[in-house]
Amino acid sequence: MKYVLGAMGCPPAILMEVPGMSQMLERARRRGTELMAAPITEERPWVVFSSCRDKDSDLFFPETKVQERSALAICATCPVQNECLEYALEADVRFGVWGGMPEKQRRRLARRIA
Ligand code: SF4
């Protein structure tokens, strides 16, 4: 398994193997996101840069509007929001907050772009 070691310590050879990784790093750097060591997964390599990576995942399956707003506030700072939303739409993820959108909003968007 390959690992991202952090914004400044990433071996370029590893970054080259993940499409869009250098752009993600640049966005993370601009937003001041601290990167951490984490495995690169084939399916969602961008997850290592996500603002929710160290947050309670229950927050992203909110039961109240207050919880939903908290999750959306985290998404608003996320450097990989576009990648996350694209993944959720392509994988037809039905539940939870993904890509800065709660499920209803994602369903509406999916219908519009279908
Ligand atoms: S957009 Fe939101 S749910 Fe998706 S990775 Fe970022 S913080 Fe997590």
Image (cartoon, rainbow, N blue to C red):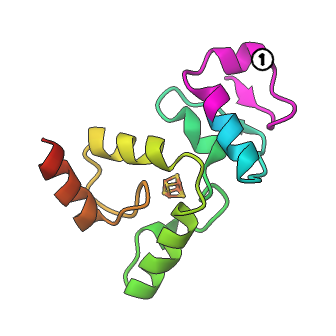
Q: Between 60 and 8, which is closer to the camera in this rendering?
A: 8
Determine if residue 91 is in view. no
Ligand 1 is within 8 Å of the C-beta of the residue at disc 1 = no
Which amino acid lies under the numbered mark 1 shown in the image of this protein? Pro
**Residue bearing mark 1:** 12
Q: Pinpoint residue 53: horizontal percent, then vertical percent.
A: 63, 55
Quadrant location of the N terminus?
top right
Vertical side of 99 occupied by 60: above or below: below
Whether residue 15 is in magenta: the answer is yes
Q: Between 75 and 42, which is closer to the camera in this rendering?
A: 75
Quadrant location of the C terminus?
top left
Determine if residue 90 is in view. yes
Position of residue 36 in the picture relative to residue 52 (left or right): right
Q: Between 68 and 57, which is closer to the camera in this rendering?
A: 68
Identity of the residue drawn at 14% across and 50% down: 112
Identity of the residue drawn at 62% across and 57% down: 51
Instruction: Give the structural element (helix, strand or loop) at label 1.
Output: helix
Position of residue 42 in the picture relative to residue 62 (left or right): right
Identity of the residue drawn at 57% across and 67% down: 74
Q: What is the quadrant of residue 24 in the picture? A: top right
Q: Pinpoint residue 27: horizontal percent, then vertical percent.
A: 66, 42
Vertical side of 61 occupied by 64: above or below: below
Q: Pinpoint residue 42: horizontal percent, then vertical percent.
A: 51, 26
Vertical side of 70 occupied by 3: above or below: above
Q: In this picture, which residue range is highlighted in magenta?
A: 1-23
Q: What is the quadrant of residue 17 in the picture? A: top right
Whether residue 42 is in magenta: the answer is no
Neighbours of disc 1 within 10 Å: few (<14), some (14-19), many (20+): few
Position of residue 60 in the picture relative to residue 63 (left or right): right
